[in-house]
Image (cartoon, rainbow, N blue to C red):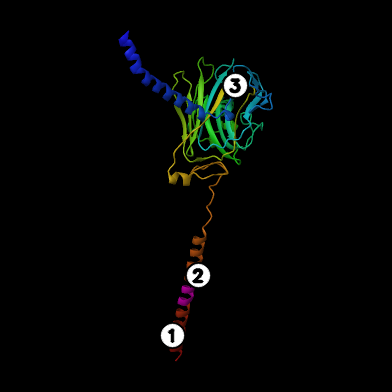
Amino acid sequence: MAAVARWWRAGLPGLLLLLLLLGARAEQTEEHLKREHSLSKPYQGVGSSSSSLWDLMGNAMVTTQYVRLTPDMQSKQGAVWNRVPCYLRDWEMQVHFKIHGQGKKNLNGDGFAIWYTKDRMQPGPVFGNKDHFLGLGVFVDTYPNEEKQQEAQKRRYTPGNQRVFPYISAMVNNGSLTYDHDRDGRPTELGGCTAMVRNLNHDTFLVIRYVKRRLTIMIDIDGKHEWRDCIDMPGVHLPRGYFFGTSSVTGDLSDNHDIISLKLYQLTVERSPEEEKRDKEVFLPIVDNMKLPGVEAPVEPMSGLALFLIVFFSLVALVFAIVIGVIVYNKWQEQSRKRFY
């Protein structure tokens, strides 16, 4: 017993230190979770209370276990939107979702979208949200429209880069682009990956990370609690002060589209002076070095010094040309007089 007591006294300080460190780590993680931008059980007051941080739209409904954007019924549309604009510089949104229904493979639709946009609560044709949006859209698309249209027209479907559905893609829009629903957003997508997410018996997750102007999307859909890369795009410029939301729509085909939680984390990232200078505030969403239909890269205005130098050297060249012209003309006159005499 004396030996046990000595061991306990010797190990107690270390155990206390370990508990303190774990507590500090947990507290630090808790501080990074931004509750004003997060949605989780029990969804208290969502869609019904004026003090709630989230609004429901359309056919969306709240239960004790999930927020259902659309039921497994035709021609339904629903969304849930955060009321608080997000001014974080670096962030990570973790989405816990479930898509399930009675339809067989490729007889279900249409999927759902996660949004970070300037406007909120604007119903429309893009997974239940407005087209020509300002901001970021991440689409979990469960129906291959392009492939099915090709089949209906009795033409062989031979796209340059075939995609297998369900498919996750992302799009940044400055308000001038149209989401091409018939082609499943292919002309404007930043990238994407196949994600078999329907009718699974385990949890499915998606994470959207925005750090140092880099957009990264990863998925955990295999029940292994491991993140798998989906999209990695540098040079993405998103303004601050936009709203988070998620929406869904069904047409002739349908599914249950359930959101179990949306958790937003503030990420603390160190930046070098060069990165601080490069990561200046933007007012329109844009992606570096990416040509999109209908969008031309903005031409940078000429600086005052450059304009002065151009005008100065142009005048010098003009004077030099005039002087050369006068000399040549005088020489020609002199030669003419000599021939005359």
Q: Residue furthest left?
A: 3
User: What x and y, as percent, mark residue 199?
Assistant: 54, 16
Amino acid type at image mark 1 = Gln
> Answer yes or no: do the residues labelled 1 and 3 have beta carbons within 8 Å?
no
Identify the residue at the far front of this view: 2
**Label 2 SS:** helix
Of the two numbered discs 1 and 3 on the same chain, state the one appearing first in sequence: 3
Q: Nearer the viewer, residue 180 or 2?
A: 2
Q: Residue 311, image x and y in percent?
A: 51, 66
Give the amino acid type for the residue marked by disc 2 in the picture.
Leu
What range is drawn magenta here? 318-324
In the picture, which quadrant includes the C terminus? bottom left
> In terms of image quadrants, where is residue 175?
top right
Question: In the drawing, does residue 258 fall left or right of residue 214?
Answer: right
283 versus 190 height, above or below: below
Closer to the camera: disc 1 or disc 3? 3
Q: Amino acid at mark 3?
A: His
Give me the C-alpha separation between circle 2 and circle 3. Answer: 68 Å
Q: Position of residue 242 (x, y in %)?
A: 59, 37
Magenta stretch, overall SS: helix
Query: Closer to the camera, 298 or 6?
Result: 6
Q: Quadrant of the N terminus?
A: top left
Residue 2 lies left or right of residue 246; in this view the side is left
Q: Which residue, given by chain and number where applicable, does mark 2 sit on?
A: 315
Camera sees residue 158? no
Q: Nearer the viewer, residue 220 or 84?
A: 84
- Mark 3 lies on residue: 257
Q: How many marks?
A: 3
Identify which residue is drawn at 49% across, 24% down. 195
> Circle 3 — which element?
strand
Instruction: In the rendered structure, find residue 335 and report the number of the disc placed on it.
Output: 1
Crowding at mark 1 (Cα within 10 Å: few <14, some 14-19, many 20+): few
